[in-house]
Image (spheres, grey):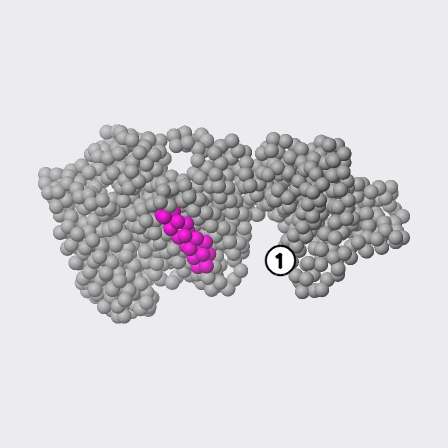
Amino acid sequence: MIINQVIATILQTILVLALAPFAVGLVRFLKARLQGRRGPSPFLPYWALATMFRKEMVISESASWVFRAAPFVVFASSLALVFMLPLVYRFGIFGGIADFLVISGILMLGSIFLVLGGIDSASAFGGMGSSREMTLAALSESSVVLIFATLSFINGSFKIDNLFGAQSVFSHPYLLLSMFAFILISLAENARYPVDNPATHLELTMVHEAMTIEYSGRYLALLEYASALKLTAFLILIANFLFPALSSEALGFGSGLMALVWTIAKVVVLCAALALFETVFVKMRFYRMNEYLSLAFFVSLLGLVVTLSVVGLNFDYATILAGLTILFVVFLFGQVRLSAILRYYALSSLAIAAIAFNLSLMSDRAEATHLWIFAAMTIIIKSIFVPIIVRAAQRRQKFVANLQSFLRPTSSYFLAIFLAVAIFFAMQQSAVVNIIGWNVMIYVAVVLLVLGLATMIIHRNIFSQIMGLFVVENGITIFILATVKSLPLLLELGIFAVVAISTIILSILSSQVREQYSSTDTENLRNLIE
Amino acid sequence: MNFFIIALVFSAALVSFVLPQPKITRRIAGIFAALNFGAVLFFVWPYLSGAQKSFNGGWWFIDGFSALMLLLVAMLYLAASLVSNRYIKHEREEGAINDNRVKLYFSLLHLFALSMFTVLLSNNTLLLWIALEMTTLSSVFLVGLYKRKTSVEAAWKYAIICSTGITLGLIGILLLGYGSGFSGSEASAIFSLSALAEKAATIPAAIAKLAFVFIFIGFGVKVGLAPMHSWLPDAHSEAPSPISAFFSGILLNVALYAIIRFQVLTNTILGDNHWTINFFLVFGTLSVLLPVFMMIIQKNFKRLLAYSSIEHMGLILLALSVPPLGIIAAIIHMIGHTLIKSSLFFGAGEILLTYKTTAIDKVRNIFKTIPRTGVLFVLGILAIIGLPPTALFVSEYTMFTALLQTHVWLAIVIFAALSAIAFAMLRLTIIMTLPSDAEAPVAGVKEKWNVTHVVMITEIALVLALSFWFTSDSGLNFINGIASNLF
């Protein structure tokens, strides 16, 4: 057994060490192709590293031993990750000690020394990069803890092998929330878009490249190799999480060999995904990083909350969809651009349609037909018609709708989460809930209601008021699904007609307000106050 | 029969929309409304006279109370259509609106009346909700008819505040249905008012209470109860005067009708009325007291009338909170307020057409400039502050009789508030009758009799006549018959 474990760990280490430069090169290559360039060969990083290892180093006179030690510590930490994480095989020789706290400790050790190395050279860029890196690390650390907490709650273990190896994502689909947060954090940890630009030294907002800017020769090679290893490890981890069946315990020769092949396939697929992502998205301003990372935090928090409330109860897909509905509305709550608000509104309506469809699977024939019509109407009216009409009203006025708000996006997210939690506890106390029992859908309905009203109050803008009204209306739609499931068909169509007519009327009215006041700020609507 | 009413009003809206000639659109509105009035009178008479108790046709329901409200809507619909003909013609000639707006105005006027009829006829809670929401949606552009800054602002506030309120009311309706379905009612019965009342004993009290809170607050926005009244003065002062009359006279009553229907239902569920009438007492008091301050400092006569509407809704609520005598007072007050307030808004429209302003400072010497409107307007003001012998005096007297038995101190406070309001309204009216220091704003064209005066005279005469009839035995029996539906 132990021999098997040792061999497995050695094989895993060799494979990842060998793959890492290729992964980095592949991302660059695919990105170049997607951008219409030829791009260098994906194998170029091997030559680059080899060249750098042979080159002479230039080290600043003011640098201390820390500067010299940093590359080794950073590389060692990456190497330790490769040893311990269940990348190719689970239950390797170090599986016994690979606790999630150990893993995050090792990750932290690496970044701390990278930061110290950046500061130690006493160059302006190094210090700047280090300070930024620490900001990001501090913001992302909490999300990492929450993600691991969620996973360990489900698997009943703190061992990283159990957390990422078990077949959990299909039996607990709400883990996708944690997964999403994990992907966001991984991008930040590995200094990829939208947090950092790995391709250039020219940008003033560089983070990782700024810290390594004083290094050269062997040390630089070590640092680059370390970051390639880390990237590869994270990519494989994500793949293992999504497709756990493809990683295996080191059982025998045949399956062990297959695992190596699968690993290469995973790396290639995820590199392609990363390249595509980096082609489509742009880097964010550094000052928007707090939004990005608080998003990650809230998604992971929501994942934890949903997990806590679902595990042990009767689990159904409606719960995830309900969670998604809330999530989209929380996003909507923090947005300032009308198009983004409309997008999240459409998405949350889509989730509601999915809830109706899901309900129809459990209902008898007549009711199921009703629910299908309901779902179809929801998609047509709320996901398509409303966004198109409201956007058309905005387009006609030829201005970019930036909706003024009392709160900054981050505080909006905090407020939204606070409200959601407060409603949870308030509802536990309410007499009505005592009668009808706890129902997650009713909870979602109330949250949407409150968030919709809050949107109308916080954003003093005519478009936000329209959208707030529709969010309230969506809350009621969920309420209908949760309580009476389906209405008589005629009345159901009547309610949809009311939504459609209000959309048109409010859109026309908003154009008129804009024409008369040349602004959409409701603060200006103050002619009639005496 | 109710299909006939609905079809008639709907075809009126359709014809108004389709007809190419705005002039014809204007004229046929009165014909349609008159036909409708005749049909409604014929239809509701058995229920009003007590010959028939109630009618329940599944989706439709009618009893003495809804019959009375239907008649009032039909009456104001007729009055508003007649006055609109003159008012809109005048505005078109002035160039304040174009032909398309004239057509829009009349189509929406008919749709607006249609949705109010539907609210009153409906036995289905969801249909009632849809119709109530349609009253808002159909009247948004009536409020914002003029493309002015202030009109658009008023329309915006009206649309957003009322839509939000009524949407909240829907939660109450769904909760009631859920509570009923929860205790085993069939799916088809949970949204029917009459079926809910039959199954009342099985609905959990906690759910019914929560539902009533949502319905009261939500629909209360539409009634214009303080402190949810912020849209009301804006919408009433910016809408064209016939629409203000329609709003103030009957729309508020229709929304209140919906609340009362659910209150009766909630009372049946809870077994007594102590819980629900507390709402009426609190919001009624607030709605009487808050407008007082605004009325004393008011400088705009249409806003003054709008605040007066809030106050009168408060009085009706207060009356409803002291049953059984108060219910009689509330019904008389609804009738009297509908007639008098609409005639005042019609009069305000005439003043506005002559002086081109709603600011009281600029309106002087109305007895000289527009003697007929002036006299009728002042008579209306005297009636609205409850001077005898008007129906409003009868109702307020009855209400205070009931209120003094239960809440003495509150009655005294309300009495003081009413005095302050009477002072505010009289002061402003007297200013309007005084000769101006500057030259006369309007050249001395002698005022002629027109349709508005006829409508105003009819309404004021009706209020005077009713005050005598209501104090007689047959009148009291009539009101008692209607009030018996509300216990």
Q: Nearer the viewer, residue B226 or A304?
A: A304
Pick the front one: A418 or B426? A418
Report which residue position mark 1 lands on. Answer: A280
Which residue is nearer to you in this view: B26 or A78?
A78
The x and y percentages for residue B93 are 29, 69
Q: Foreground residue, A153 or B264? A: A153
| Residue at point 67%, 36% (across, down) | A161
**In which quadrant of the rendered view does residue B358 lie?**
bottom left
Residue A375, magenta (yes or no): yes
The answer to whether residue A465 shows anywhere in this view is: no
Magenta region: A369-390
User: In x, y percent, where is residue A253?
Assistant: 71, 41
Most frequent secondary structure within the magenta stretch: helix
Q: Residue at x 81, y 47 (%)?
A: A222
The kind of secondary structure element at disc 1 is: helix
Residue type at mark 1: give it: Val
